[in-house]
Image (spheres, rainbow, N blue to C red):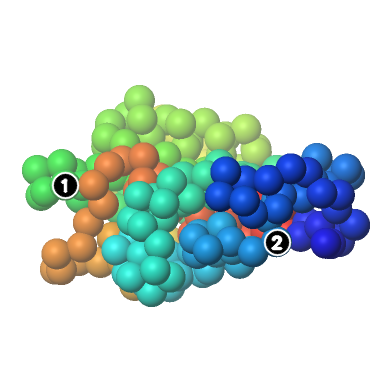
Amino acid sequence: MKCKVCDKKCIKNGFQANGVQRYFCRLCKKSTQKRYTYKSYQKHTNKLIYRLIVNSCGINDISRVLRISRHTVKKRLLYLSKQTKRPALFEHQQSYEIDEMYARIKNKKHRYWITYAINRKTKTIVALYIGKRKAKHIANVVNRILLLNPKRIYSDHFSSYKKLIPKNIHRAGKSLTNHIERLHLNLRTHLKCLSRKTICFTKSLKTLEAIVRLYFWGNTINFKYV
Ligand SMILES: [Zn+2]
């Protein structure tokens, strides 16, 4: 049998408890079966989960479409989000927009804020933080932009930004953040748990974080190895 990851020949490596032959790849040190009966172990499942979650499918939808359990989908989402990488940036003297949007968890009382910043020109997401809407939390995002030696930072009139961003590079105004406001709309359309005026929501902050990370930086995952 050929290895599913590196296409090299595998050697036989004992049997499962139910009598199915197991194989072992000497190159990537992975033990596999020729065929799996449970659908979540099939080759393209992780890629399908990623594609569905960023195209307005919820966890329950994916579970119904792929016929795997909800718990597995959730576990895979957390695993995949760990494989994403925040882009390493070496730019300077660029303009950034920073803003926050709310997401509700469990019920309307649990409100969390997704704070993130984009490069105005390249539209890459520079920094992301999900949590409360206070200065010490927003500082996580602002400090990361300040490390890049920015030319300008555009935001709305929210008081925390005035505290955190140096005056000479800060510009505040609702009309100055239209690029990032448009991205908020994309998020609300493409992620089911963020769509407003529906009954969709995530049950935990961890899952919400995983989904948003996958939406922003999911293209950094190499699906051949996960
Ligand atoms: Zn291999």
Q: Is residue 53 above or below residue 158?
A: below
- Give the percent coordinates (x, y) of residue 65: 38, 74
Q: Image quadrant of residue 89?
A: top right
Q: Position of residue 82 (x, y in %)?
A: 55, 41
Q: Name the residue carrying label 2.
A: 34
Q: What residue is shown at x 42% (from left), y 39% (from top)?
A: 129
Q: Position of residue 90 (x, y in %)?
A: 75, 43
The type of residue carrying mark 2 is: Lys
Indicate the quadrant where residue 160 lies: top left
Question: Disc 1 marks which residue?
Answer: 106
Identify the residue at horizontal 36%, vertical 40% (top origin).
206
**Does the Cβ of the disc 2 residue fall within 8 Å of ligand 1?**
no
Q: What is the quadrant of the N terminus in the image?
A: bottom right
Question: Residue 69 at x, y = what percent?
Answer: 36, 57
Task: Check the image and report above or below for 13 versus 195.
Answer: above
Relative placement, left or right, of 106 versus 73 is left
Question: How many marks are shown on the rendered structure?
Answer: 2
Q: Residue at x 70, y 53 (%)?
A: 21
Circle 2 or circle 1, nearest the eye = 2
Residue in the foreground of this view, choosing between 95 and 50? 50
Q: Is residue 220 left or right of residue 76?
A: right
- For this rendering, which residue is in front, 27 or 199? 27
